[in-house]
């Protein structure tokens, strides 16, 4: 699993001009799921996201987590995070999980984040053409990959 986590002041997802998910302060999380991902990957990543301390404390240091600032999560599925661009100019998405594997893991990530944060996780619609708007705060953008746990 691969996640791009952006600290935001606000974020919103629309599908066909209808808002599917919207948050104020918190994280916009773009989530890519690959065929090799397991429940262990999901649990590790969810814990890391929920506990990530990138919000400023009283001294301006990034010491506060989502819960400390009453933040929320907007979770967006994004298979393009597994684009392979080694050959040619057209990316290959062969490593991205097919919907029959990805959808259950995406749904489990939603419920796991809700359990860890105690708040509803806002979402897009899996596989839909989504328009995401956000106000990046900082900017602070963190990339996590469960296949690279030792570096996080």
Image (cartoon, rainbow, N blue to C red):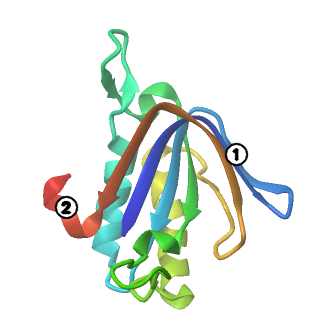
Of residues 2 and 22, the one drawn nearer to the viewer in this rendering? 2
Question: Is 143 on the left or on the right of 131, as rendered?
Answer: left
Name the residue furthest top: 59
Of residues 151 and 113, the one drawn nearer to the viewer in this rendering? 151
49 up-or-down from 32: above or below:
above
Residue 68, position as x, y percentages in the image: 43, 27
Q: Name which residue lies at 50% across and 58% down.
A: 30
Crowdedness near tag 2: few (<14), some (14–19) or many (≥20) residues, C-alpha within 10 Å: few
Of residues 103 and 3, the one drawn nearer to the viewer in this rendering? 3
Residue 32, position as x, y percentages in the image: 45, 69
151 up-or-down from 86: above or below:
above
Mark number displayed over residue 149: 2
| C-alpha gap between disc 2 and disc 1 | 30 Å
Name the secondary structure under disc 1.
Answer: strand
Q: Quadrant of the N terminus?
A: bottom left
Name the secondary structure under disc 2.
Answer: helix
The residue wearing badge 1 is 22
Q: Name which residue lies at 53% across and 68% down.
A: 78
**Pointer 2 or 1: first along the chain:** 1
Question: Is 142 on the left or on the right of 26, as rendered?
Answer: left
Q: Name which residue lies at 53% across and 61% down.
A: 110
Question: Is 64 on the left or on the right of 103, as rendered?
Answer: left
Q: Name which residue lies at 50% across and 82% down.
A: 90
94 up-or-down from 111: above or below:
below
């Amino acid at each position: 699993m691969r996640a791009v986590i952006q600290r935001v002041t606000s974020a919103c997802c629309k599908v066909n001009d209808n808002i599917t998910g919207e948050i104020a302060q918190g994280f916009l999380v773009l989530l890519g799921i690959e065929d090799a991902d397991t429940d262990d990957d999901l649990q590790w990543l969810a814990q890391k996201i929920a506990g990530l301390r990138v919000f400023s404390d009283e001294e301006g240091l990034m010491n506060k987590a989502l819960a400390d600032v009453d933040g929320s999560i907007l979770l967006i599925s994004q298979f393009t995070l597994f684009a392979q661009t080694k050959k040619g100019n057209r990316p290959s998405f062969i490593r991205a999980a097919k919907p029959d594997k990805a959808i259950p893991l995406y749904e489990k990530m939603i419920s796991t984040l809700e359990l860890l944060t105690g708040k509803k996780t806002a979402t897009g619609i899996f596989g839909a053409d989504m328009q995401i708007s956000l106000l990046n705060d900082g900017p602070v953008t963190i990339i996590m990959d469960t296949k690279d746990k030792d570096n996080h």
